[in-house]
Structures are given as structure tokens and as C-alpha cells.
Image: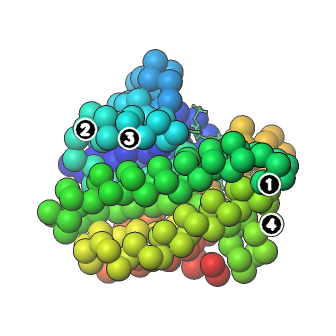
Amino acid sequence: MRTALVTGGNRGIGLAIAAGLVAQGIRTIIGARDLTNGRTVAQQIGAEAVRLDLQDKASLAAAMDAAGSVDILINNAGVLFDGSMLADPEHYRASMDVMVDGPYHLIRLAEPHMRSQNWGRIVNVSSGWGSFAEGLAGPNAYGVAKAALNALTKALVRDLPPGVKINAMCPGWVRTRMGGASATRSPEEGADTVLWLATLPDDGPTGGFFRDRKPIAW
Ligand SMILES: NC(=O)c1ccc[n+]([C@@H]2O[C@H](COP(=O)([O-])OP(=O)(O)OC[C@H]3O[C@@H](n4cnc5c(N)ncnc54)[C@H](OP(=O)(O)O)[C@@H]3O)[C@@H](O)[C@H]2O)c1
């Protein structure tokens, strides 16, 4: 049985991803900042939970140890701050920690097991706001972090063995705390492309950027 770790799996798109993985018979672990809440949510969907705070580097290794061998890593957690990136270096730092450095360190921690079996699936939940082609349209720190996450996705193909696939995706505009109540998609719709990338067959794509299961421009 495969094991999956979903960061930010306690609510929003991450929770829909976790539920979708459980439904496919995958052992699924939610990474949550608040472990008590994470455990409660995990129990409701048949998953497990570990404490994971992407701004606390020590918690990353502890979470991976607690999870055991992770075959499928979903870097889903995100933060979105309005305002000037220059005026607010703390929000810039948090954006980079949660959406770039945290995913990088988790990939490093997951990679030895994936390499040993030459099988792994890494999905980076990004955004069209991190796309140069779409104009880096969102708040600055968010767009810069998602663009860096996209770059990480493309560059890491060179460092990973061929059986380990890494892809980025945009879920569209989704009704979550981040997306707001007016958003056009449900969390389940937002999770669909993640679930597809998490379970790609051996001849599936790697190093790509997708929305609605179709490639989109960086
Ligand atoms: N919603 C949209 O329209 C939309 C569009 C494009 C891309 N996305 C991307 O989709 C992903 C999920 O977003 P969402 O809409 O589901 O957002 P959300 O409902 O706001 O959930 C964000 C998740 O990230 C977690 N998180 C934040 N900071 C963290 C940290 N330091 N350590 C660990 N976890 C942390 C949150 O945990 P807590 O509960 O502890 O705060 C929560 O589980 C994000 O990467 C987002 O950028 C969303």
C-alpha cells in the first residue's frame, strides 16, 4: 500500500485531496500545524495526522519520521498576504517558508525512499498567480513564491530518478478560506488534478504545470 503525506491537509483543498487519496485505498497522512485538530479531521476521513509547521524546520524531519516512508508527497499548504512585499518582509519570509523552502526540505527528506524504489509522486500545489505567462497577477509575495515553486518543480526533474515524477498544478479559484465564498470551484474540483498527478502511471508526465489535467504555460 502506498503512503501519502498532504501538507495543509486539515482544511480546504488539502482536506479534499486527503479524502480523495483515502478513497483510493492509499494510506494518507495529514500534515497539520495543530495536531489535535489534525487528528480530529483525519479521523473523520480515515486518514492519520502528524504535526507539521512549514515555518518550523525541525518539525519537517519529525513529521517525515512519524509518517514513515512517504511514496506520494503533496506540497499543498499555502499562505496569501495582501500588500507590498517590500513593506512586509515577514510576510515575504512566511510565503517563502511555506511555499518554497518547506516543500524543498520535504522533497529532500522523501527522496531517499523514493529513489530506493525508483517510484514516487510529488505534486506541488501552485497557482496561475505564479505563472509568468499569466502575468504574476496576485499579491507579490504569493506570486514570487509560487513562481519559485514552479521553478523548483521544473529544475528538480534533473535531480530525481526517472521513476519519481514531480509536477506543479493550479487548482483554479476554489471556495476555501483562501479563495473565499465567491470562488467558482468546490474543494473537490480543486483537488481533482492533484489526485490525477499523485497517481500517475509510469508513462505519465513529469516536470509539468497543469490545470484541469491539461498542461498550462509557466
Ligand atoms: N483557494 C484558491 O482559490 C487557490 C487558488 C490557487 C492556488 N491555491 C493553492 O492551493 C493550496 C491550498 O489552498 P486552500 O485554498 O485550501 O487554502 P486554505 O483553506 O487557506 O488552507 C491553507 C492550508 O495551509 C496550511 N498552512 C498554512 N501555513 C502553514 C504552515 N506554516 N505550516 C503548515 N501548514 C500551513 C493551513 O493550516 P492551518 O489550518 O493551520 O492554518 C491550511 O491547512 C495553497 O497552496 C494555495 O496557494 C488555492
| Residue 65 marker | 2
Residue at image mark 1: 86
Give how far apart the Cα atoms at labels 3 and 2 are: 9 Å
Q: Is residue 212 left or right of residue 28?
A: right
Residue at image mark 3: 60
Residue 211 in the image: above or below residue 96: below
> Residue 167: x percent and y percent?
46, 69
| Residue 137 marker | 4
Ligand 1 shown in quarter? top right
Give how far apart the Cα atoms at labels 2 and 1 are: 37 Å
Q: Residue at x 52, y 33 (%)?
A: 10
Q: Earlier in the sequence, mark 4 or mark 3?
A: 3
> Residue 1: x percent and y percent?
21, 48
Q: Secondary structure at mark 1?
A: loop
Q: Secondary structure at mark 2?
A: helix
Nearest-to-viewer mark from 1 and 3: 1
Amino acid found under the numbered disc labelled 3:
Leu
